[in-house]
Image (cartoon, rainbow, N blue to C red):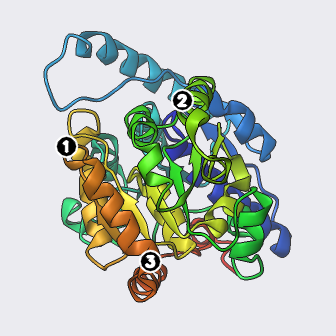
Amino acid sequence: MTGGRTGGHIYPLVAVGAELQTQCGQRGIALDLRYLGAYGPFKGLLEANNIKVGKVAESKLRRYMSIHNFIDGPKFVYSFMQAMVKIFFFMPDVVFSKGGPGALAVVMAAKFYFIPVIVHESDAVPGLTNLLSSKFTKLVLTSFPGVENYFPGKQVMLIGNPIRRSLLAGISTESKQKNKGAFGFDPQLPLILVIGGSQGATSINDFILDNLSEILQVTQVLHQTGTKNYEQTLKEVSFIVEKMPEEISKRYKAFDYFGDEINLAYIASDLIVSRSSAGAIFEIAAFGKPSILIPLPPNIAANDHQTKNAYDYAAGGAAEVMEQTNLLPNLFINHVKKIVEDQTLSAKMSNAALAFAKPEAASKIAQIILELTGNAT
């Protein structure tokens, strides 16, 4: 397996790895599962999931002129040579790529050794690495409808974004009210979950805190701030709630990062406010939750993929999209109030989310990989 250094690349690979381990265990197949690529802060996560980790230098591919291209060009040549050597001494049966810095070198090395490659694209607009990697494979797996148009002449399968099976635990057995109470909320009042990824989303955090007094008049808030923003958020909140009645101030709870226990937060929530990464969208959909999506601005998200993700997902009725330039307090609070107070609307959004969800994506990808190795039965 290969990918980039972000959670959006690594977590789906962990999900597929877990399914491979399960399916191989059930069939008595010996499995040697490895990750080769850039891993950022996720080396420990990969190793904790019984995936051996190797590194190649990461080099960013750009569609525009930049002085950094003069640095990353030689780095790419170096990473390709690293991949050639490391793959030679392993010689896998299949390479599964999620794209991202470092992945293209591994894909090209695999092609040199005639090793089958599967490319998976999470977003509604493919990244440059996957567009280039597709030249070296016959099979591209996608998450959003319409992405096949970016890969002419290739076999493309719409399969969804892989989600860890452990994350989906409790969907059918856990109670929303019970989980609200477990987090210290009133089980009878609506609850919104605000998430921005492991690092948080500073602009969303600031918006929530700037308008917290008004938001808490409408709903309770469970807020994942991101580890870097957590202490500062607590300081600001302590000042904001100082003059609030206790019954109102108790409607806000902040966490730095949920990890796997985010499933309990998903179950407890009536509405989710989130960025629109593919990972976030497919998790929200799997739990059948209405959402308000706030895409990363175009100047930050490559190819404006989060905006395309958000609108493609919202087209089915599962979400409202608020671009950051339109993130106005009254408009936001009216959206929240409309969704949490209108049970018919909330149910329609929930049903649309479940219709979009593909919780078996990781299992299906593992099956496809095993088919390429001749171990499908």
Which residue type does callout 1 highlight? Answer: Thr
Circle number at residue 325: 1
Which residue is identified by label 2? 38
Asked which secondary structure carries label 2, the reply is loop
Measured as percent of width and height from the top left, residue 127 is found at 30, 45
Q: Which sits in the foreground, 269 or 252?
A: 252
Q: Is residue 73 left or right of residue 95?
A: left
Task: Please tell me which of labels 1 and 3 falls first in the chain.
Answer: 1
Q: Are marks 3 and 2 in contact (CB under 8 Å)?
A: no
Q: From where the camera sits, is residue 266 visible?
A: yes
Dot 3 alpha-carbon crowd within 10 angstroms: few under 14, some 14 to 19, many 20 or more: few
Task: Please tell me which of labels 2 and 1 falls first in the chain.
Answer: 2
Q: Is residue 331 left or right of residue 261?
A: left
Measured as percent of width and height from the top left, residue 110 is found at 48, 43
Pair 1/3: label in front: 3
Circle number at residue 341: 3
Circle number at residue 180: none
Which residue type does callout 3 highlight? Answer: Glu
Pair 2/1: label in front: 1
Q: Which sits in the foreground, 139 or 269?
A: 269
Task: Please tell me which of labels 3 and 2 falls first in the chain.
Answer: 2
